Amino acid sequence: MAHQGDSNLTETVVQLLNENGLAHMAEAIRLLLNEAMRIERAQVLEADLYQRTDKRRGYANGYKPKTVDTRIGPITFEVPQARGTSFYPSALERGVRSERALKLAIAEMYVQGVSTRKVTEVMRELCGLDVSSSQVSRAASLLDEELEAWRNRPLGEYRYVFLDARYEKVRHGGAVVSCAVLIAAGIDPSGHRSLLGVSVSLSEADVHWRSFLATLQERGLYGVQLIVSDGHAGLKSAREARFSGVAWQRCQFHLQQNAGHYAPRVAMRGEIAADVRAVFDAPDRIDADRRLRMAVEKYAATAPKLSAWLESDVPESLSVFAFPRCQRRRTRTSNMLERLSKEIKRRTRVATLFPNEASLLRLVTAVVMEISEEWETEKIYLRMESD
């Protein structure tokens, strides 16, 4: 059970989890509790696997699967068995009995970057165990192996690829800096969507994007017909280098927001937004170009900077008209990643500041994996047949 002397951070995390839950973390919980139970068995036997010692009180006797139903879904644990002594892991009993402590333990390990010191405290909180630094490192590495395997899994054909970035605060070299989190999603030929990968780096935007896109290709990404993203300069140069000749759709949502920045007066923003939407909502490219020319001419005298911006930037958001009408609504913006970005923000706001890049990558990957699992159970996201 949770101790009475919880810190303010602990209470914050508990409140967050009570309100929102911690869905799709069953695999992480399984790995951590399996390791906790293995450690506890070694402590009871006073000897680890294959260790020779005069104090030994029994012998390890393999593992037995046990499925436990929890509010986050069924979890199958590998329960350690022992000969020569009465043993049943209190870690499992206590973890299942106190789901609040279980969720808190997982959350704090993610929030704190799975530091050795913090995980030691969490394992004691969750399981009542005192563990060594090497044991903690092993438990943490099991999580990292699972997350890294997901990030490096093979890809395949995805006709539409969506790219987005967000920034989180990371401590680096004694200072607090912004760290870029890059995310890629795709829609395959059957119309199902998938999250393709995630990357975290303090490097320059162009270098980071170029490396990230190269990694996606190395993992087998092919068949891309359209890339959807915002107009970030670093992403643009990286995309042109790695996906030369692939059509680019500039996110209409972000572009429409940018239009307001060119309004000479605040009162004009509503009218400008309506004119931009009219271009985007045109039935075909010919009509979209006609509506755009009208808007350019309309503001040439009253808002010349806006007129020039409309003429130069808005055409970048009209590539979607070359694709079937039934696919345009969900491919004209990068809003498909909006919910994912909100989920990442909901988790990272608890941490506020990450101790290093690895810590941030661990949390972000876990969140992306959760959403990815949900998408795998969805019906077709995009009808791929032509009109």
Image (cartoon, rainbow, N blue to C red):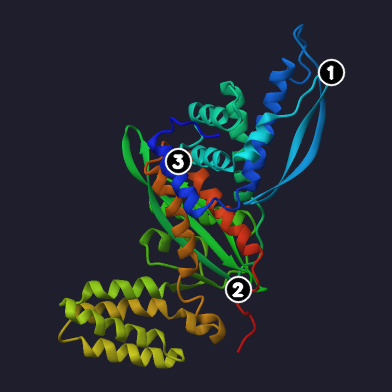
| Badge nearest the viewer, 1 or 3 | 1
SS category of the residue bearing label 3: helix
343 or 3, which lies in front? 3
Which quarter of the image is occupied by the N terminus?
A: top right
Which quarter of the image is occupied by the C terminus?
A: bottom right
* Distance in Å between CA atoms under marks 1 and 3: 46 Å
Position above or below: 3 against 21: above
Tell me where residue 233 appears, x and y as whole percent.
36, 62
| Badge nearest the viewer, 3 or 2 | 2
| Badge nearest the viewer, 2 or 1 | 1
Badge 2, how many Cα within 10 Å: few under 14, some, many 20+?
some
> Is the residue under label 1 in contact with that under label 2 (CB below 8 Å)?
no
Q: Closer to the N terminus: mark 2 or mark 1?
A: 1
Tell me where residue 67 appears, x and y as whole percent.
75, 45
Q: Say which residue label 3 marks.
A: 357
* Distance in Å between CA atoms under marks 3 and 2: 33 Å
Inspect the image, locate mark 2, and give the three-letter code of the amino acid beneath it. Answer: Tyr
Q: Say which residue label 2 marks.
A: 381
Badge 1, how many Cα within 10 Å: few under 14, some, many 20+?
few
Position above or below: 194 against 198: below
